[in-house]
Image: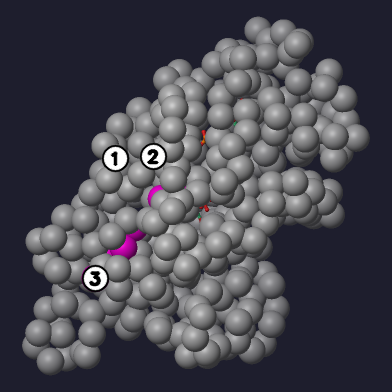
Amino acid sequence: MTDALQPRFRRLLVTGGAGFIGSCFVRDLLARRDGSRVSVLDKLTYAGNRANLAPVEADPEQASRFRFVVGDIADPAVVAPLVAESDAVVNFAAESHVDRSILDPEAFLRTDVLGVHVLLEACRAERERVRAGDRAAAPRFLQVSTDEVYGSVATGASREDDRLEPRSPYSSAKAAGELLVHSYFVTYGLDAVVTRGSNTYGPYHHPEKLIPLFITNAMDDQPLPLYGDGLQRRDWLYVADHAGAIGHVLEHGVAGETYNVSGGNERTNREVVTALLARLGKPWSLVRTVEDRPGHDRRYAMDGSKLSALGWTNTMTFEEGLAATVDWFRDNQNWWRAIKSGEWDDYYRRQYGARLAGSREAT
Ligand code: NAD
Ligand code: TYD
């Protein structure tokens, strides 16, 4: 996560650290045993899971440098004291699933926009404390954003200064969040950086998303609901590479700048499904063509050269990463079976009930 033996930031606040990418960031950071301390602030929504941090809590040395706080990033009373004792804030907390944003957008505005604002206000207050001589330096703020803010990209690859054209409630809220971050850099001189990651996959991925949903459904010989023609294209990024890139930008990124984190693995959804079925030894006949997602972005692709120039390189190929992911889900059934129960059933019915009833065999 850092190239130096001494980390630049010794006390980190990681918001949304019980989620998929945030928990990977925390596990990998603490496993470096470099003395840095991590506080996770997480609301534990349906997507947050303390089990994602079990490896940290089971290791006495790591656990001694780790604290878990259950709370909402949109609650200033919870946020302010945590930011006051941190050298850096890394904001993973978000409502993150496009399909849920179509079913119910409001929570996305609350967390992905207002929550970001509350975090920024707390950082701004710390700048005032620096001016008053109460602390040496204000915290650095890193906002974890997404390639989806560029909207659907028919050809070529998005660069950081391209126009933002988000098209879903999720990506619009994420765009609003990162624009607020930029405005706090410009207006108040906040030390802030933004990353825009591409579609991420790997262990601990919530089974609502394409890859883990299809792996876990296929393991149970359940139908795999492929939206529309399945020729939409995504650029896949292994979770440890995404988390590592965020750590790299935290350490080395220039204040006020935004960095694409590209996976370099553009695939159609059909190609992804074919590959995961092959790894599992399951037949294509499980795949069902279902009604498409409204406003479905056809393609995401980003140019990652700015981050490469900052010195970051991904380590995992898509083939290795997918194999590791399939194997992890095969070996950790307790983890995902616990998630695919309770609230899950209601969500699955709303999202897929009518779709599967009206589905046809995928060719
Ligand atoms: P996730 O849904 O797995 O985790 C989100 C976490 O945030 C959960 O632990 C949840 O409990 C927590 N949370 C939600 N609302 C909160 C609130 N109001 N206060 C405190 N905690 C709250 O998401 P993820 O896939 O790990 O994504 C993390 C970040 O990365 C998000 O900001 C997302 O927009 C971004 N991102 C994700 C991807 C991807 O493919 N998954 C790609 C690019 C960027
Ligand atoms: P998803 O994992 O939801 O990520 P995003 O929408 O943020 O890219 O979906 C990845 C792709 O897979 C996207 O084109 C939608 C498609 N998809 C399906 O075809 N069926 C599904 O059940 C899901 C969840 C996604």
> Which residue lies at the image location 59% right of the left edge and 15% below the top edge?
228
Residue tagged 2: 158
Q: Is residue 243 magenta?
A: no
Select label 3 or label 2 by which is in front. Answer: 2
Residue tagged 3: 191
Q: Secondary structure at mark 1?
A: loop
**Quick check: marks 3 and 2 in contact, CB under 8 Å?**
no
Q: Is residue 60 left or right of residue 7?
A: right
Residue 214: percent from the left, percent from the top? 72, 33
Q: Secondary structure at mark 2?
A: loop
Q: Secondary structure at mark 3?
A: loop
- Can residue 217 be seen here? The reply is no
Distance from label 1 to label 3 (Cα)?
A: 22 Å
Q: Is residue 183 left or right of residue 238?
A: left
Residue tagged 1: 162
The part of the image, by quadrant, that contains residue 137 is bottom left
Q: What colour-coding does the image apply?
A: one colour
Residue stretch in magenta: 191-197
Residue 61: percent from the left, percent from the top? 64, 89
Residue 48: percent from the left, percent from the top? 54, 55
> Which residue lies at the image location 65% right of the left edge and 7% below the top edge?
358
Q: Residues within 10 Å of mark 1 (few under 14, many from 20)?
A: few
Distance from label 3 to label 2 (Cα)?
A: 25 Å
